[in-house]
Image (cartoon, rainbow, N blue to C red):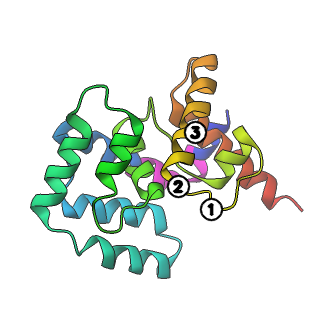
Amino acid sequence: MWSKKYDKAFGWQAQRERELGTKFRKNKALTLKDLASVVEWKFKAEPEKLQRAQELIARNNEEKVQRITSQTFSVPNADDMYRLNCLSTLEGISPVIASVILTFFDPRNYGMFEQSVWKGLLGNPPPGLFTPQNYVRLLQSLRKTAAKHNLDARVIDKALYKKAVDETSKP
């Protein structure tokens, strides 16, 4: 129910996520333009963060982006830390942006690295939350919850995010 509410409330994001995810799975690699689209998706509502992230992304060259993302996606059964480390070799790719890329590519096994999702699954976030190790910890909890309900990790992630948004906007 909460995941459907997310799709309805965040229609542009949900549609763009589906489009980019389909493209990433088909091509099994990203272009520089794809990276810029991911950053736009993540920071559309935050112009300063968007501009800074786009400047960092633009420092990458096309060949490196395609090589690194192809390597990230094509290694069968690669562990999460490997994928995060590969993606983070690119300029402007933090664990948060890497989580977006991985979620778009494989929504069954990945979710967004968000404070509200962490709080919904693991309680109050620790200081310095946004590390690769903490994302892996979040993924373990997200996958366990998803398996329990026979759902994709992204469905659980969207539900927790939307529920948190609704609860914080109540008077």
Q: Residue 72 falls in which quadrant of the image?
A: top left
* Mark 1 burial class by Cα count in 10 Å: few <14, some 14-19, many 20+: few
In percent of the image, x 31 and y 25: which residue is there?
A: 77
> Could you say where residue 125 lies in the image, as x and y percent from the top left?
71, 53
Residues shaded magenta: 7-16
Q: What residue type is labelled 3?
A: Arg
Question: Distance of mark 1 from mark 2, alpha carbons?
Answer: 7 Å
- Where does the C terminus fall, quadrant-wise? bottom right
Between 154 and 109, the one nearer to me in the picture: 109
In percent of the image, x 14 and y 59: which residue is there?
A: 64
- Side of 31 relative to 8 (left or right): left
Which residue is disc 1 drawn over? 128
Secondary element under disc 1, as helix, strand or loop, is loop
Q: Does the magenta stretch include residue 11?
A: yes
Q: Does the magenta stretch include residue 94?
A: no
Eyeballing the image, is 30 above or below 83? below
Circles 1 and 2, Cβ within 8 Å, touching? The answer is yes
Which residue is disc 3 drawn over? 137
> Could you say where residue 13 lies in the image, as x and y percent from the top left?
47, 54
Q: What residue type is labelled 1?
A: Gly
* Mark 2 burial class by Cα count in 10 Å: few <14, some 14-19, many 20+: some
Eyeballing the image, is 135 above or below 74? below
Q: Residue 60 falls in which quadrant of the image?
A: bottom left
Between 10 and 43, the one nearer to me in the picture: 43
Eyeballing the image, is 144 above or below 85? above
**Where residue 131 is drawn, which disc sits there?**
2
Q: Which amino acid does label 2 sit on?
A: Thr
* Residue found farthest to the left: 63
- Where does the N terminus fall, quadrant-wise? top right
